[in-house]
Amino acid sequence: MVVFRWIVGVLAAFFAVGMTFSFVVGIAQNSEPPMRRARRLRHWLWLVMLLWFNVEVWGRVVIVIIHWI
């Protein structure tokens, strides 16, 4: 589980940095393509974080069910 958390954390950090950089470039240049990229990266960041949350919650549920039996 620790390896999964590190992988998700690194992916989330990459998406967050890319999103922030694209947003700053889009604001500075007043250009639409970097803003679209920032939105796309924000959506990927949400996807990764929801995946992490679901794996954490359902992993705990499975562990409790296994130990309960």
Image (cartoon, rainbow, N blue to C red):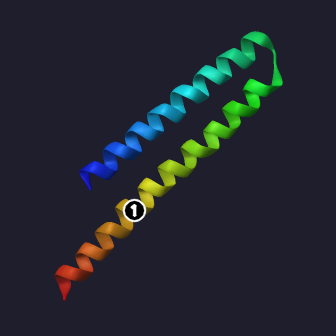
Mark 1 secondary-structure assignment? helix
Please state if 2 lies on the left or on the right of 41 as rendered: left
**Measuring 74% from the left and 27% from the top, which residue is drawn there?**
35
**Measuring 47% from the left and 39% from the top, which residue is drawn there?**
12
Please state if 65 lies on the left or on the right of 11 as rendered: left
Q: Establish if 66 lies above or below 31.
A: below
Q: Position of residue 57 (x, y in %)?
A: 37, 64
Tell me the quadrant of the picture where the N terminus can be found. Answer: bottom left
Q: Position of residue 9 (x, y in %)?
A: 38, 40
For label 1, the crowd category at 10 Å Cα-Cα, with few meaning under 14, some 14 to 19 and many 20 or more, is some
For label 1, the residue is 55
Q: Establish if 28 lies above or below 23.
A: above
Which corner quadrant of the image does residue 10 belong to?
Answer: top left
Q: Establish if 8 lies above or below 60.
A: above
Tell me the quadrant of the picture where the C terminus can be found. Answer: bottom left
How many numbered circles are shown? 1
Please state if 34 lies on the left or on the right of 21 as rendered: right
**Measuring 82% from the left and 25% from the top, which residue is drawn there?**
32
* Amino acid found under the numbered disc labelled 1: Val
Q: Residue furthest bottom?
A: 69
**Measuring 25% from the left and 50% from the top, which residue is drawn there?**
2
* Viewer-proximal residue among 56 and 4: 4
Q: Position of residue 4 (x, y in %)?
A: 33, 52
Q: Position of residue 27 (x, y in %)?
A: 74, 16
